[in-house]
Image (tube, rainbow, N blue to C red):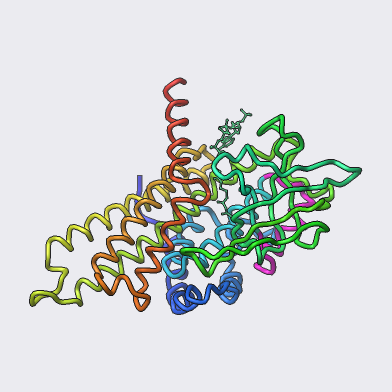
Amino acid sequence: MNFQLDQDHQMIRQMAREFAQKEIAPRAADLDERSQFPNENVKKMAELGFQGMMVPQDFGGAGLDTLSYVLVLEEISAACASTAVTMSVNNSLFLGPIFKHGTEAQKKKYLPDFAAGKKLGAYALSEPGSGSDAAALKTTATKKGNKYLLNGAKNFITNGPHADAMIIFATLDPAKKHKGVTAFIVEKEFKGFSVGKIEKKLGIRASSTSSVILDNCEVPEANRLGQEGEGFTIAMVTLDSGRIGIATQALGIGRAALDFAAKYATEREAFGQPIAKFQSIQNKLADMATQIDAARLLTWRAAVLKDQRQNFTKEAAMAKLFASEAANFAAKEAVQILGGYGYIREYPVERYFRDAKITEIYEGTSEIQRLVIAREVLKEISQ
Ligand code: CAA
């Protein structure tokens, strides 16, 4: 086992770090303050191939592996968590399922523009009445000729107001529970599609989140993703990958909090010496660093397993669970190390503190990650 990144991965990481620190980090506070969607960042990331990192070059993507994606996403997340989730949703939750489950025609139609960053994608599973219990969704799909009519509402959709198309999950027959769920690629121009309420959030305020309304939304049969009734499996498989992205986002936020707090501790003096000399501060830095390192190892392992085409459901859930809790711990400790300065907007740690929280909620709460992990553990011992 080798814990060193190879030269290509080191170069990707270095390039992403320089880009993120130069182009993304300087505007993060302002975008957050104004809840302004990071259009300019998305454009610049697209120029570097970051919007379609794992899509093969034949389809207009960068053709890189999941580990490369994770290395880049950590750097973007450390600079601006809002920009990071915008990138992550397009890569993992929109392009991922189309590449994995789409027909050749769907791949040709959707992958190139969305991978090149000319268009933006989203993923709509949650509803006002179903979040963790995803199979309880109520949005219906009714076949009519060579179309489906979708009716219902989707909630908390990242990129919702800015997305050109999204993967929407609906049921053909609620009585069939998860076996009725079917996935569709829905374009914003489709008749009956509209963006609903735009949410004001605690953190990741520069990312956009909205509900989506489907009022007899007309979806051509050619836009069904996978077979009828396959949608729930597609949703779950997609979330396995998505959770690697959110683990990485958390990792980036936690690392940024540690870096800032450690530097501050060497500069801030109290009782006649830098506060970094006090063991109470050193203990915090040690615990933050250890948790962040462990989160990185778990996240990289999940990414490598995915690249090796091995099962990574449990490992992705572990990575997301641990990294999101580590990020919240690190951000909380960073605020404490900065004291009053940690609580005001002049310093970035209050943003890290607010941004970290969502990583324990979206793409499956910590409670759902524990459920997924426990089910896999029990499955393993019964084999
Ligand atoms: N891979 C493949 N198949 C899977 C799977 C996986 N990871 N997980 C479940 N399945 C399959 C099961 O094998 C089963 O298939 P069969 O019927 O053929 O046997 C089927 O799916 C049903 O599985 P379960 O019985 O386990 O389903 P459940 O109802 O108990 O729910 C759950 C499982 C894990 C709790 C699931 O509902 C879940 O993950 N909930 C959280 C949803 C979530 O993360 N939502 C976030 C949405 S995205 C977002 O946050 C917004 C955004 O814009 C970023």
The stretch of residues the image draws in magenta is 101-121
Instruction: Tell me where residue 190 appears, x and y as whole percent.
Output: 81, 58
Residue toward you, 35 or 183: 35
The reply, left or right, for residue 355 in relation to residue 117 is left
Residue toward you, 257 or 24: 257
The reply, left or right, for residue 304 in relation to residue 268 is right
Task: Please state, as top left, top right, bottom left or bottom right, where the N terminus lies in the image.
Answer: top left
Instruction: Tell me where residue 89 appears, x and y as whole percent.
Output: 58, 57
Residue toward you, 375 or 304: 375
Residue toward you, 222 or 334: 334
The reply, left or right, for residue 280 in relation to residue 119 is left
The reply, left or right, for residue 79 in relation to residue 38 is left
Rendered view: 299 above or below 264? above
Magenta residue check for 141: no
Quadrant for residue 137, please give it: top right
Q: Disc count in the image?
A: 0
Rendered view: 233 above or below 359? above
Residue at point 71%, 59% (across, down): 165
Quadrant for residue 212, please give it: bottom right
Residue closest to the far left:
272
Rendered view: 215 above or below 268? above
Residue at point 18%, 57% (across, down): 283
Residue at point 81%, 57% (across, down): 192
Instruction: Tell me where residue 35 appears, x and y as whole percent.
Output: 53, 72
The majority secondary structure of the magenta stretch comes to helix
Q: In which quarter of the image is ligand 1?
A: top right
Residue at point 13%, 75% (across, down): 270
Instruction: Tell me where residue 300 appears, x and y as whole percent.
Output: 42, 50
Residue closest to the far right:
145
